[in-house]
Image: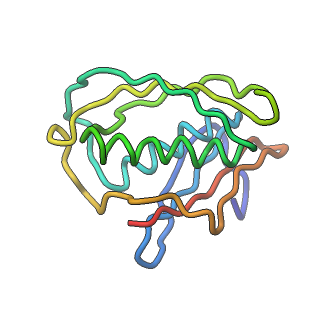
Amino acid sequence: MTGQQRAGSGHRAVPHTADMRVEAWSPTAEGCIGEAVRAVVEGFADTSGAAAVGQRDYTVTAGSDEDLLVAVLAEVIYRMDADCEIPMEATVGAIRDAGDGRAVSVRFRMTEADNAVLVGAVPKAVSLHGLHLRGGPGGWTCQVTLDV
């Protein structure tokens, strides 16, 4: 994030030519990943009036916390493509060491895509360009671009 630190947790879309770019912030890395999921979903779907159809539990391992962020967002895209489901909520468990890398468990409360109102282009992939997930004195921040 640039500029002054933000209090609490939150997210926002950042103008970006032809792609979707989001920023998120939280006191914890896990909270930041959850906020990034919310930002991405809000970028293409309004799920506020949608009914939940179930939940998906997902555990990912990766080499770094940034790679965990990429993997969780890639799962959002995969669920939309493979199952026509969109996360209404994401609960991100504690990031932990796993062998030579890191691991995190995520629980998505899902709705069917037909229950949501599409408000933008559905992302196709997570870009590694400009990606970051970092902790600092004011908490954690992340930035990520998604190809649409």
Residue occupying image coordinates x 61% and y 23%: 93
Question: Between 35 and 121, which is closer to the camera in this rendering?
Answer: 121
Number of marks in the rendered image: 0
Q: How is the image coloured?
A: rainbow
Q: Where is residue 134 drawn, in percent x and y? A: 76, 49
Image location (x, y in percent) of residue 124: 39, 60
The outermost residue toward the bottom is 17
Q: Is residue 148 above or below residue 76?
A: below
Q: Is residue 65 left or right of residue 100?
A: left
Q: Quadrant of the C terminus?
A: bottom left
State the residue in front, 63 or 86: 63
Residue extending farthest left: 114
Res 144 → quadrant: bottom right
Looking at the picture, does residue 9 appear above or below residue 96?
below
Q: Position of residue 90 (x, y in %)?
A: 46, 30
Q: Residue at x 63, y 37 (%)?
A: 8
Q: Quadrant of the N terminus?
A: bottom right
Q: Residue furthest right?
A: 137
Horizontal side of 30 relative to 22 (left or right) equals: right
The x and y percentages for residue 67 are 66, 47
Name which quarter of the figure residue 143 lies in.
bottom right
Residue placed most toward the observer, 142 or 96 = 96
Residue lying at 35% horizontally and 40% vertically, measured from the top left: 79
Return the residue nearer the eye: 106 or 61. Answer: 61
Q: Is residue 16 above or below residue 105?
A: below
